[in-house]
Image (cartoon, rainbow, N blue to C red):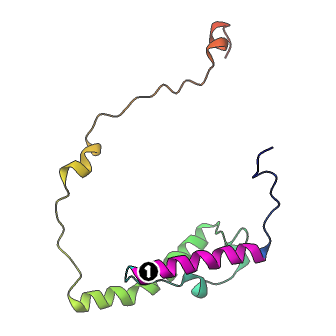
Amino acid sequence: MNSISSMPPLTYAELRAAIDFEHRVFRKLAKTEHLPFLELDSHYPKDPNNFTDMFHQWSTRAFRLQGWVLAQLLAPYIKEQIAKGALPRRGKAPDPESIAWATAQPKRFNLDCVPDSLERLGGP
C-alpha cells in the first residue's frame, strides 16, 4: 500500500485552505514580478453544474464561462497597455536554436509492451 492510497479524502475546508494558500502564493508572485493578479475565484459563479467538486471544472460550458470571465478581467490591462503604447508590439524572429526541434527528425522509440518471455512462447 502506498501513502497516497492510504490517505483519506480531503474535506471541503482542507481543499478551500489549499486553494487559498495557492492564491496567496500566486498573488505574492504577481506582486513580486509586477504583474496583475486576476482574481477569477471571486468573479466566477459558484454554480455546482460547472464543477465536479466545487473547485475542478468539468464541462465545456464551464471552461467557456471561465474564458469569458478571464477576458473581462484582462481587458482593462490590455486597454491600459495599448494606451501606453506598449501594445501591440512588432513580432520578432525567434532564435533559430530555440525552434530547432520543429525541423529535427522525430525520435523513434520501441513502444512494444510485450515481455520477451511471452514473445518467445508465442503469446500476445
How far across and how far down the image is residue 14, in percent? 75, 73
Residue that badge 1 annotates:
30
| Percent position of residue 43, x then y | 58, 87
Q: Residue at 33% across / 85% down in the picture? A: 78
Is residue 27 depicted above or below 124 in this figure? Answer: below
**Which x, y percent locates residue 101?**
29, 44
Residue furthest toward the top?
121
Q: Quadrant of the N terminus?
A: top right
> What residue sits 25% from the left and 41% below the top?
103
Tag count: 1
Query: In the image, 46: left or right of 60?
Result: right
Which residue is nearer to you in this view: 107 or 64? 107
Considering the whole magenta stretch, tell me its main secondary structure: helix
Q: Quadrant of the C terminus?
A: top right
Which contiguous range is marked in magenta?
13-32
Vertical relation: 52 (above or below) 40: above
Viewer-side residue, 27 vs 65: 27
Q: Residues within 10 Å of mark 1 (few under 14, many from 20)?
A: some
Disc 1 is placed on an element classified as: helix
Q: Would you say 122 lies left or right of 102 here?
A: right
Instruction: Report which quarter residue 10 is drawn in.
Output: bottom right
Report whether 109 appears left or right of 88.
right
Q: Amino acid at mark 1?
A: Ala
Q: Is residue 24 magenta?
A: yes
Is-magenta flag for residue 8? Answer: no
